[in-house]
Image (cartoon, rainbow, N blue to C red):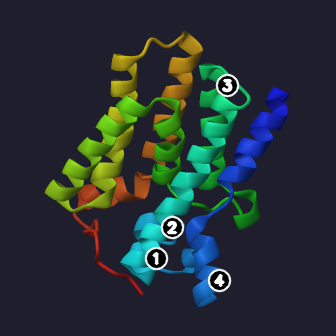
Amino acid sequence: MSQLLMLAISYLVGCISGSYILGKLFYKKDIRNYGSGNAGTTNAMRVFGKKFGIITFLIDFIKGAVLILILKFIFKLDNTKLLLASLFCILGHDFPFNMNFKGGKGVATTLGTFAIFNFLPTLISVVFWIVFTLIFNTASISSIAFFILLFLINLYFKTFSDIQVILLIIVVSIGIFRHNSNIYRLITGKENKIGARKR
């Protein structure tokens, strides 16, 4: 598989949006027109309910996990190419061409790709993510912490080349950047708790 084809496929897989597909299929609604306007798990949960949010998370997680699973164990790609594939899958989720580049924030998709790429650091990051969620009951705080810890714990457990560290930084930076509106609301005290539904 050529690198260009691999990146194109990774991006297109990322463009599969769980919340958008389910919203159109079951509610005849575009999730981006409701709540925060984000096509991700948290907004899906707030707008359409917890069950809808869980299914959204699973779709976005599985697409990333299956992509890296195939590339890692069938095509035997090295870590640099796997990180590139993860990055482009996340870019597809966050900026899908078929949704006018207005997608989600990439937490579930990042989790899915990294769960296969490097399982133990990802698992530890998820544990901290859950702890932060239970403590603060705010999705944005726990998600931002997840991205930061994912980077730090990966570096602790594994030796990366310079290009791989740069790719890790880009993945984490995109994840945090996608939460910029949440960061503003956290600073101003206007951020919503998990489960606070918007219509």
* Quadrant placement of the N terminus: top right
User: Quick check: can you spot residue 180?
Assistant: yes
Instruction: Identify whether 4 is placed above or below 29.
Output: above
The amino acid type, in three-letter code, at marker 3 is Lys
Residue linked to disc 3? 81
The amino acid type, in three-letter code, at marker 4 is Leu
Dot 1: what SS? helix
How far from the left and from the top, in percent, is residue 32?
57, 74
Residue linked to disc 1? 52
Residue linked to disc 4? 25
- Earlier in the chain: of badge 4 and badge 2, it is 4
How far from the left and from the top, in percent, is residue 116?
52, 36
How far from the left and from the top, in percent, is residue 88?
66, 40
Dot 3: what SS? helix
The part of the image, by quadrant, that contains residue 123 is top left
Residue linked to disc 2? 56
Dot 3, crowdedness within 10 Å: few (<14), some or many (≥20)? some
